[in-house]
Image (cartoon, helix red, strand yellow):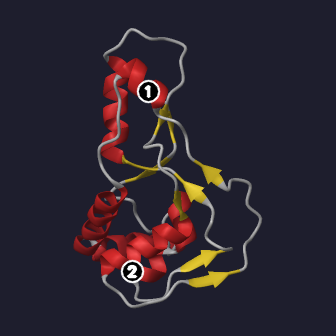
């Protein structure tokens, strides 16, 4: 199983932003009321898949008699970092504007896989839409802000 870019409600903010591709939208800044930073033009694209869908893919794989195969666990939908930042701004209802910064060196500009083989061979299809997954993430973080902040402080040493 190859998880493309997973997200889950308990994705913890330890360094001021989220790991994986979400860091590029500078989610941590947004939660703190600062404008989200997008590096480059925001055209880098990923396939975001919710953790519950990742778990469902593994269950599907365990139920079939297939060996030595590789499956993309994703939605097959391309979402740019700019689109991700705009969606987070919409969900949070903020009037902040995206702050574009010079791009650093990046090797992955498009990470979107085809879920066709997973659908045909193991019966997996992602069900949670990106917007709902982000809403769950934002809601969870809002309910656990003090816990997350304590972990951030601990990680900073």
The residue pinned by badge 1 equals 118
Q: Residue at x 56, y 46 (%)?
A: 112
Q: Secondary structure at mark 1?
A: helix
Q: Residue at x 37, y 39 (%)?
A: 54
Q: Residues within 10 Å of mark 1 (few under 14, many from 20)?
A: many
Residue 37 visible in the snapshot: yes
Q: Is residue 143 above or below residue 108?
A: below
Q: Earlier in the sequence, mark 2 or mark 1?
A: 2
| Front residue of 21 and 115 | 115
Is 124 displayed left or right of 26 in the figure? left
Q: Quadrant of residue 123?
A: top left
Cα distance in 3D space between marks 2 and 1: 35 Å
Q: Is residue 143 above or below residue 124?
A: below
Residue 135 image offset from top left, x and y in percent: 28, 66
| Front residue of 153 and 89 | 89
Q: Which mark is residue 107?
A: none
Q: Residues within 10 Å of mark 2 (few under 14, many from 20)?
A: some
Residue 38 image offset from top left, x and y in percent: 59, 76
Extreme-left residue of the structure: 143
Q: Residue at x 67, y 82 (%)?
A: 101
Q: Secondary structure at mark 2?
A: helix
The residue pinned by badge 2 equals 31
Residue 19 visible in the snapshot: no
Q: Quadrant of residue 24?
A: bottom right
């Amino acid at each position: 199983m190859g998880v493309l870019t997973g997200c889950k409600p308990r994705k913890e903010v330890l360094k001021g932003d989220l790991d994986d591709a979400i860091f590029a939208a500078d989610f941590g800044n947004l939660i703190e009321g600062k404008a989200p930073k997008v590096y480059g033009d925001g055209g880098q694209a990923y396939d975001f898949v919710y953790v519950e869908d990742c778990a469902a893919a593994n269950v599907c794989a365990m139920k079939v008699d297939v060996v030595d195969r590789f499956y993309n666990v994703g939605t097959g939908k391309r979402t740019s970092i700019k689109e991700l930042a705009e969606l987070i701004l919409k969900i949070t209802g903020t009037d902040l504007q995206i702050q574009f910064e010079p791009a650093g060196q990046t090797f992955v500009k498009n990470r979107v896989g085809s879920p066709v083989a997973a659908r045909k061979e193991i019966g997996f299809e992602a069900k949670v839409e990106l917007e709902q997954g982000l809403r769950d993430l934002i809601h969870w973080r809002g309910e656990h802000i003090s816990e997350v902040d304590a972990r951030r402080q601990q990680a900073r040493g």
